[in-house]
């Protein structure tokens, strides 16, 4: 094998090419951007700033490593005891200690200045065009558009059959939701983060930030998305057994399409309020109730209503088969303290609550033939506030 040799070290050509290739990879901006393990650039100005800061720090660290290891290997090869060199005594050398204290201090200051500027910009939420409050629940997200009075829950839409390996998994397995967060591009969006139960963490890497949602506190961040598209994320805080089941999906649209969505959503909210006065038939309620149950309740109570571990069964249970449905309304609307049963009165509409309760009272052989109406939910909730 061809190479080159001196009295201290032998170097083959393959090793030389490997060294040159590694150096090229590390210091080529184009290639470093495309490396699969590198930080993504994202689709917001702040994500670009974070990426550039990350690469600047990376290059500084590489330069330091190159200098330190260069000096170290040079010393090991050219000043080793085997060829007669004797180590010099630098103990208590004031000049050397001052030098290796001042140089790292200068390097840290050089690194801290751009990092501080990016951090300040990252937390500058003033002059926003839109404000959205994001609340974490076990295990879903609630989005409230403060400027338009629009709110909805975003829940995992991956079928339970896929989770249980009964059907093939889709491309976006466990990263798909029923209602994505709709945002306009080119607008500064201010996000307010909090939680209804435990600590969650809202993270979409393409936006360039991650923020904790803490009960009793409001954290904030902002983003201006550059281009339309679908951007996915997930809860980044271990928040319970359903932690892996609360993904985030952002649908970024043009300002014109966003306005159309807002108009359509306001019309749908108006219709939902009108439905609250409707009297549903058993078949109508069962069809709608099954959709809600499959989306929200199956994680704990299973699709067959048999329950799971600490989560009680609903099939054949007294709470879903007794003639008096007050106990079930109390549990579903207001939750049950000391258990994982949440208060769904604030999460579901009166129509959704009525339909899902009707479904549980008539599925899996329960067959009570009872139909809970939205007005029954409203009457019970108002009388127990």
Image: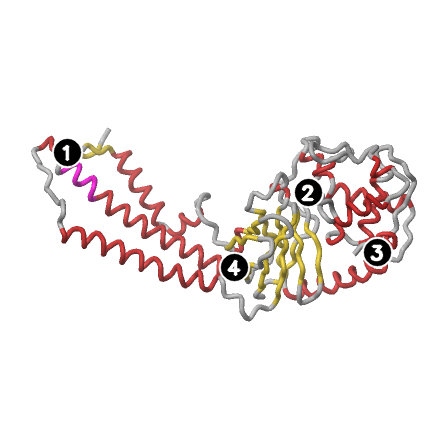
**Separation of marks 3 and 2 at Cα, in angstroms:** 23 Å
Residue at left 70%, top 52%?
153
Locate residue 217 relative to residue 37 in the image: left or right. Answer: right
- Residue 142 in sight here: yes
Tags 1 and 3 in contact by the CB under 8 Å rule? no
Q: Earlier in the sequence, mark 2 or mark 1?
A: 1
In percent of width and height, residue 141 lies at 65, 51
Locate residue 78 relative to residue 106 in the image: left or right. Answer: left
Q: Which of marks 1 and 3 is nearer the N terminus?
A: 1
Disc 3 crowd, CA 10 A, few/some/many (<14, 14-19, 20+): few
What number is the disc on residue 21? Answer: none
Q: Name the residue under label 2.
A: 338
In percent of width and height, residue 202 lies at 57, 51
Q: Mark 4 points at which residue?
A: 44
Q: Name the residue under label 3.
A: 383
In percent of width and height, residue 293 lies at 77, 42
Q: Judging from the image, what secondary structure is the residue with disc 2 in?
A: loop
Residue at the far bottom in the pictured view: 127
Q: Judging from the image, what secondary structure is the residue with disc 1 in?
A: loop
Q: Which of marks 2 and 4 is nearer the N terminus?
A: 4
**Separation of marks 2 and 4 at Cα, in angstroms:** 42 Å
Near-viewer residue (114 or 346):
346
Identify the image quadrant of residue 273.
Answer: bottom right
Camera-nearest label, 1 or 3: 3
Residue 179 forms part of the magenta stretch: no
Disc 1 crowd, CA 10 A, few/some/many (<14, 14-19, 20+): few
Q: Which residues are drawn in magenta?
A: 71-78
Q: Name the residue under label 1.
A: 8
Q: Main secondary structure of the magenta part?
A: helix
Locate residue 183 relative to residue 222 in the image: left or right. Answer: right
Residue at left 82%, top 43%?
328
């Amino acid at each position: 094998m061809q190479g080159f040799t001196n009295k201290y070290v032998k170097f083959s050509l393959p090793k030389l090419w490997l060294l040159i290739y590694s150096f090229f990879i590390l210091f080529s901006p184009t290639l470093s951007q495309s490396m699969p393990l590198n930080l993504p650039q994202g689709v917001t100005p702040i994500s670009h700033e974070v990426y550039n800061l990350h690469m600047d720090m990376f290059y500084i660290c590489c330069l330091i490593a190159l200098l330190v290891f260069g000096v170290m290997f040079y010393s090991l090869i050219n000043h080793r005891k085997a060829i007669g060199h004797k180590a010099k005594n630098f103990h208590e050398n004031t000049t050397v200690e001052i030098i290796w204290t001042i140089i790292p201090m200068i390097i840290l200051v050089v690194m801290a200045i751009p990092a501080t500027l990016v951090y300040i910009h990252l937390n500058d939420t003033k002059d926003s065009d839109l404000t959205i409050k994001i609340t974490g629940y076990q295990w879903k997200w609630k989005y409230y558009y403060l400027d338009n009075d629009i709110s909805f829950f975003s829940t995992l839409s991956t079928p339970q059959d896929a989770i249980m390996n009964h059907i093939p998994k889709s491309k976006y397995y466990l990263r798909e939701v029923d209602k994505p967060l709709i945002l306009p591009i080119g607008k500064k969006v201010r996000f307010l983060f909090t939680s209804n139960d435990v600590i969650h963490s809202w993270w979409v890497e393409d936006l360039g930030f991650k923020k904790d949602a803490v009960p009793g506190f409001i954290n904030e961040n902002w983003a201006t998305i550059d281009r339309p598209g679908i951007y996915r994320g997930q809860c980044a805080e271990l928040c319970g057994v359903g932690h892996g089941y609360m993904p985030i999906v952002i649908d970024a649209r043009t300002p014109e399409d966003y306005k159309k969505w807002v108009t359509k959503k306001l019309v749908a909210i108006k219709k939902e309020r009108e439905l609250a006065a409707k009297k549903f038939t058993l078949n109508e309620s069962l069809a709608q109730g099954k959709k809600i149950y499959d989306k929200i309740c199956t994680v704990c109570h299973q699709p067959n209503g048999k329950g799971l571990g600490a989560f009680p069964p609903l099939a054949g249970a007294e709470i879903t088969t007794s003639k008096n449905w007050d106990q079930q309304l109390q549990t579903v609307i207001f939750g049950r303290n000391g258990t994982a049963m949440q208060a769904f009165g604030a999460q579901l509409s009166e129509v959704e609550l009525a339909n899902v309760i009707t479904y549980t009272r008539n599925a899996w052989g329960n067959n009570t033939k009872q139909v809970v109406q939205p007005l029954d939910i409203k009457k019970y909730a108002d009388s127990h506030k």
